[in-house]
Amino acid sequence: MSSKFHNQIKKIFLEARELPASQQNEFVKREAKGNHALESEVFSLLENDAEQTILSIDEPEPNHEVIDPLGLEKIKIGTRQSALSEIVFSSKGRVGIAFLIVALILGLFGVLTTQRTKAALAKMRGQETLTILNSNVETLHYWIKNFQTTTELIAADDQIVESIETLLEQPKPSETSNNLDSILSVPLAKTKGFTFIVTDLNGHILYSPISEYNGQRVGDRFGKEIFSVAGGKPQFISPFYPLKKDGQNEYYTEKPMVWMQVPVYNKQGEIIATFGIGRNADTEFTNILRTARMGQSGETYAINKAGWFISESRFEKDMRGNGMMHSDTNISSILNLQARVKNYKTSHDLLPLTALANLVIANADAKGDHESKYLIEPSEDYKGAQVIGAGVWLPEYEFGVITQVDAKEAFAPAKYLYVLIAVVLLLLLSASAYSFYSARQLVDMRGAVNSAIQLGQYELKKLIEEGGMGAVYLAQHRLLKRPTAIKVIRLDKQDQASAKRFEREVHLASQLTHPNTIEIYDYGFTSGDKAYFAMEYLNGRNLAAIVKSSGAMPPGRVVHILRQVCASLFEAHTLGMVHRDIKPQNIMLLNRIGLHDFVKVLDFGLAKPFVETSGIEETRAITGTPVYIAPERLKRPGLAEPSADIYAVGALAYFLLAGNPIFSYSSDLDILYQVLNEMPKPLPETVPQNLARLTFFCLEKSPEERPTSIEELKMFLDNLAIEYPWTSEDAQKAN
């Protein structure tokens, strides 16, 4: 976005937001002069402007609608019910027929919607298995590449090259062989290598710790790979059992191995031999494919062209129990279990491969790109369950990878849809019958409501926003006439757990008195047993809206804001509370008399004590906004420690300095993976190094590596404030 375009947006937006809502559209279109991109940006800012949500709302006009998500009524202030509604609701027969017709229409609509929703859910689940498959395959690629690089580094070691050159001159095992064992013992241990071999370019084994191999020619399992390596191309060999002699079923190892063979170069850059390392396949190789999986029945595994497992099954215990595998627990499923259907009506030898195995193996001989594909039609798998999943053949490694999940688990949400439709139809039919007796009472109830909704001493003027477990209204105290923001718990959330959380939110927030924390005035219940609390009515904008309209902030302003945020959090932490949802939308900037860029920290509704709780909190899973949640809270959602707020302050600092969040993402899986495993990209070069270092200090994955307390973090910021001051004049210019 150019500077000129940005300034146009800012100018029109700031002028438009001062106008009544009814005049904004016409004003923006007139000022944009046909520039649709400019119109779109300004309208987007107006829709998301914080002052149009909880902070600064024009006074309602006479007869303005109060939209009531609590389920009371949608009424007009100062008006009576129309004559038409009186006629309709006084006719019991018409009301009953109307409800019956609606029930029938909704019933038909429900059947059609159910079918379409089920199809959409199936496609979504297929895409999820595809995402998990691709994630595991990418991790597998990285692991194999790392295995190759490690092997190549060892093969390039001068001492090893010299020892191999000596072996080529004296092919029989000698002191050179013992020397090679000694040299390789440490790097093998560090790289989790199990064994190694050295071969000449004709495929003869010059040396192996397994003495019987020395002097032999490599078998069929290694033959073509060795000659490919001799041509300069490293080779990864998928899991196998090394035989003592070709053609015999007697193995040197009890567990399968994966192998990496690379060329050995002399000082002249000529290939003189090949060198390979073997690792146990039932540890790292299998664990790589367990990086991500779906639910309780999901798994990812690898198979060869014959359908044999070359990674361990997640359900080995079940396979042993039903006779599909050897009962000896020391025998892995690798190369001992085939991806064949369990309940096919024929002899075991003729059991067909599973549909997912066929999907993958069918592409083994295909030319060109091998794309990942998914099957959303349930089919039987190797353990007898109906599954859906995705698979891909990896030609460079000569094996395929499959991700699957039981169809029963994948489509479990669909049953709730059927229940919901049945409940809705039952309620509508019941309402239709009841309407014959209650139509007159309904008219009387509606006629009695002819003014604004009252909650205790407060008169609700206008709905500001809905979110979390409540709705926020612009209100006015009946006696003091003070503008107030009222938060009310919604009727459809009114259960015991919700009520307790609501009450805890008020009790915790009411203890906070710091000037940078939003103030709670009052708390109570309505006659209908709905809870509410009254709080400050703020006239300002949140940081998300400011950054969206003005871009990244200068260092001095960022330090000025963060110091106030830390001051608010210091009081909360001192009282034993953690905010748990620090983010740009919950930080407001106000301009008060003599004070500019004054911070208010909002929504201590997710605050909780410094303990890992259960009970009420267990139903909430991970609370907060994903991109601002500390890694440790993703692993232990009930955890509440000050270090989580410190991480969120770091993420907030990054957003203000860069103008964008710490990570960009397209799915929940994507952001969760990045928060757990990756560090954000470096901040722009215009950001001072000491401020950038402090930001990344707060974003460390381990809580122990962050600032020890919010007080320590504020001390760092206080020191930076001396170097990067922010004055009232600076704030006025920025606003």
Image (tube, grey):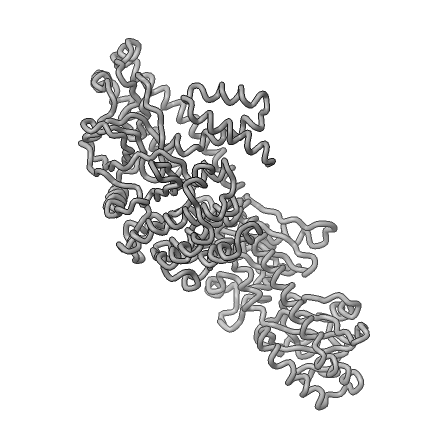
Which quarter of the rendered picture does the N terminus lie within?
Answer: top right
Q: Is 666 situated left or right of 205 in this image?
A: left
Percent coordinates x, y for residue 248 in the rendering: 67, 76
Identify which residue, 214 or 608, lies in the foreground: 608
Total numbered labels placed on residues in the image: 0
Q: Quadrant of residue 303?
A: bottom right
Q: Is residue 414 visible?
A: no
Residue 101 x %, y %: 37, 19
Q: Nearer the viewer, residue 537 or 253?
A: 537
402 left or right of 518 in image:
right
Question: Viewer-proximal residue, 345 or 192?
Answer: 192
| Residue drawn at x 36%, y 24% as measured from the top left | 103
Q: Quadrant of the C terminus?
A: top left
Quadrant of residue 538 within the rendered picture: top left
Can you name the residue that lies furthest to the bottom here? 175
Q: Is residue 292 above or below residue 90?
A: below
Residue at image location 58% in from the left, 65% down from the top: 285
Can you give x and y, in whole percent of width and height, for residue 421 in the image?
A: 38, 32
Identified at 38% across, 47% down, the residue is 581
Residue 195 horizontal side relative to residue 9, left or right: right
Write the residue at 42% across / 25% down. Answer: 18
Task: Give the quarter of the image for residue 644.
Answer: bottom left
Is residue 269 in view? yes
Find residue 15 and report its horizontal and vertical position in percent. Answer: 47, 26
